[in-house]
Image (cartoon, rainbow, N blue to C red):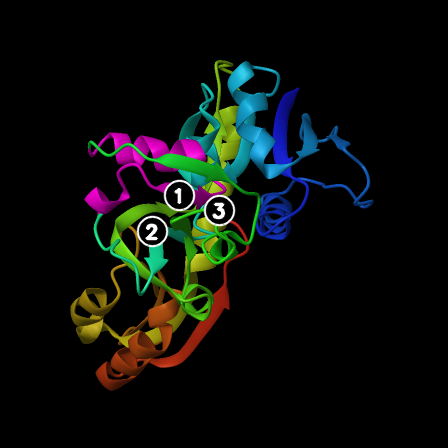
């Protein structure tokens, strides 16, 4: 039975659960439940703190897990990234008071840096020849400078508004672009590939839609250039041999633009259908 670690709370938890459900797995119904067995799919889910998942997987206690790339790198465990899952995106940056003399990475040498990810930040700085003192905090690191426990911070940034409100300015390069990832450890379980295919199928289903339309035969080559599909469009004859029925998979974000272009070519009865699962 494949043993999978999933986040029990936090920003990754809900989306991870939704993705696994879309991939055909059953999940826990009681949020207090720490272990759930999906006998039909021969998997066992363990609901753990996101920061602990890489440690459990890296030790071999569990086969695979879903966590953040930032948490994986900060853990120092033997876990490895198998695939990005394209949710829970975050960006890590340095910030310091606008009135300070810290405006470059080299200025951090010997300074105190408040962060929830000390190993991640330390590895980044050491790789660039900078040694600094790290003040580990579990949250609200933007207050550390104002309270006198740090000279700068390294934290997740979206708009930067929270940092600016604390009198801090972003500087230096991006430390890490993080996202949710599927991670593995030393166990080479045969069902890991099946799990990966299912999760990748969910990603495809979220990005693409099926488009069906009728088209004059003479416009088929031009329509195929507008929407070529993953391999090529599926083309079926109609009773009127001057027309064909076409089915193609297109990016959902581009669906309306593609419909407009196909209509201009003479396509009619254009229909778009959501994809609930896929294997490519």
* Numbered label attached to residue 185: none
Residue located farthest toward the front when viewing the structure as drawn: 148
Q: Position of residue 84 (x, y in %)?
A: 41, 41
Query: Camera-side residue: 193 or 59?
Result: 59
Residue beneath label 2, please?
94
The answer to whether the residues at label 2 and label 3 have Cβ atoms under 8 Å apart is no
Q: Earlier in the sequence, mark 2 or mark 3?
A: 2
Q: Secondary structure at mark 2?
A: strand
Residue at image x 47%, y 39%? 135
Q: Nearer the viewer, mark 2 or mark 1?
A: 1
As drawn, 135 above or below 246? above
- Identify the residue at image location x=28%, y=36%: 125
Q: Is residue 266 magenta?
A: no
User: Where does the N terminus fall, quadrant-wise?
Assistant: top right
| Chain part drawn in magenta | 105-128
| Marker disc for residue 113 | 1
Residue denoted by label 3: 149
**Secondary element at tag 1:** strand
| Earlier-in-chain disc, 2 versus 1 | 2
Report if residue 110 lies within the magenta region.
yes
């Amino acid at each position: 039975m494949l043993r999978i670690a999933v986040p029990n709370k936090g920003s990754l938890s809900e989306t991870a659960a939704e993705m696994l459900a879309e991939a055909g797995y059953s999940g826990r119904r009681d949020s207090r439940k720490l272990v759930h067995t999906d006998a039909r799919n021969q998997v066992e889910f363990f609901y753990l703190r996101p920061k602990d998942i890489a440690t459990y997987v890296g030790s071999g206690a569990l086969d695979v897990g879903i966590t953040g790339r930032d948490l994986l790198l900060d853990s120092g465990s033997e876990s490895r990234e198998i695939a990005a899952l394209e949710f829970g995106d975050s960006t890590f940056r340095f910030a310091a008071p606008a009135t300070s003399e810290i405006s470059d990475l080299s200025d951090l040498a010997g300074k105190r840096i408040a962060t929830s990810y000390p190993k991640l930040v330390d590895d980044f700085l050491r790789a660039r020849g900078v040694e600094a003192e790290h003040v580990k905090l579990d949250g609200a690191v933007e207050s550390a400078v104002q309270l006198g426990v740090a000279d700068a911070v390294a934290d997740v940034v979206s708009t930067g508004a929270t940092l600016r409100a604390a009198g801090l300015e972003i500087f230096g390069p991006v430390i890490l672009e993080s996202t949710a990832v599927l991670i593995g450890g030393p166990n080479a379980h045969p069902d890991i590939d099946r799990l990966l295919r299912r999760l990748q199928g969910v990603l495809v289903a979220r990005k693409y839609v099926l488009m069906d339309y009728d088209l004059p035969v003479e416009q088929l080559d031009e329509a195929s250039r507008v929407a070529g599909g993953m391999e090529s469009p599926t083309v079926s004859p109609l009773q009127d041999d001057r027309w064909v029925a076409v089915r193609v998979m297109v990016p959902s974000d581009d669906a309306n633009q593609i419909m407009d272009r196909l209509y201009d070519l003479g396509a009619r009865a254009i229909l778009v259908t959501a994809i609930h699962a896929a294997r490519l």
